[in-house]
Amino acid sequence: MAELSHPEENLLFPVFSADSQWLVTSTDDEGVQIWDGKTGQLRHQAHDEEEPFLATSFLPSGDLLLTSEEGAAQAMNPSDGSRQVMFNGAQIAAYVQGFSPDGRYFIGSYDNETHIYDASSGHKLADLPMEVVYPQKMIFSNDGSMVIGGKEDGTVMVLSVPDARLLNSFKAHDDRWAAQGLYTYDNRVLTVSEETLKLWDFKSGALLRDFNTGENLEFSRAIFSADGDSIYAATSKGLVLQFDALKTPSSWTLTEMFERGCEIIKPSPVSHYLIASPVLSLSLIHI
């Protein structure tokens, strides 16, 4: 396990590049940090005093997408830190959740609204339902044809891409954010709501697994492994648990323990690493 030495500020939106070579984090006041995705060494930093940028996603080209609170967008080369203005300087989204697998669309929010955008032009294509106002509560399906989002009342919504038609909805949790740990693989989606971790078929709304350990663990986030065979779940008590996603009942093992609860957990797309963050520290874990 490698500890990443970062500014003592709130960590925002850690994200791996598609090839897992780079790991990027943002902080409130210290801008963007680019790390080696395997060693955890800091490679570059980007900070603008007048218009701070956040790094929330990688572009299909491999460049890093930087966005500002005003909706401006820049593309940054993670190798040398060079940058160029995107979309002819037009305002798009202050926060970008991520791109569809084919790179044609992205989910972004601007001025308290969330939309589906055309990735080549930055044009807004569809408004997403106001019940799901946080883009971090939404994610593309693996084939890019759908967006899955969680509502505050515990409902999961499945919407078409790019026109945002409602295809399905189902109640995942009682009166809790259904997408606290929203993550998809094939037709499956994980939902997390404090004491409950569930696996669903999001096309049919069928419950596939209820990962009840019998412990009061207070789950905070959950992800699939790169091959979809395992599930890693972080808890507010500082544990990361590994579940077998294919067996019923599912076995679970303790992967790592921290002094404080894990607020962020992210997988590396093509290598055996994940990111876990106990409050204001960041750990790169080999799994």
Image: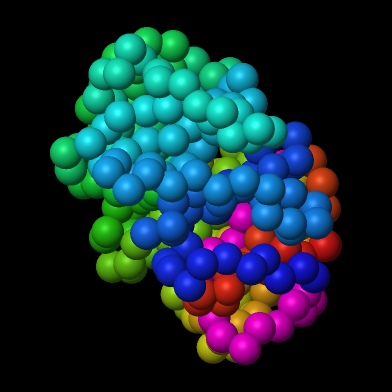
Which residue does the image show at 39% across and 64% down from the upper left? 173
Any magenta on residue 55? no
Q: Find residue 28 and report its horizontal and vertical position in percent.
A: 37, 59
| Residue 13 appears in view | no
Q: Find residue 210 and report its horizontal and vertical position in percent.
A: 58, 66
Any magenta on residue 267? yes
- Quarter location, residue 256: bottom right
Taking 110 as reference, is 169 left or right? right
- Quarter location, residue 53: top left
Which residue does the image show at 51% across and 67% down from the upper left? 7
Which corner quadrant holds the N terminus? bottom right
- 266 over 10 or under it: above or below: above
Which residue does the image show at 46% across and 21% down from the upper left? 84
Q: Find residue 60 and report its horizontal and vertical position in percent.
A: 59, 22
Nearest the eye: 14 or 78 = 78
Taking 158 as reference, is 130 left or right? left
Taking 172 as reference, is 186 left or right? right
Which residue does the image show at 62% across and 55% down from the upper left? 266
Q: Find residue 18 and report its horizontal and vertical position in percent.
A: 69, 34
- 255 over 39 or under it: above or below: below
Coloration mode: rainbow
The segment highlighted magenta reads: 252-269
Total numbered circles: 0
- 23 over 66 or under it: above or below: below
Which corner quadrant holds the C terminus? bottom right
Dominant secondary-structure state across the stretch colored magenta? strand
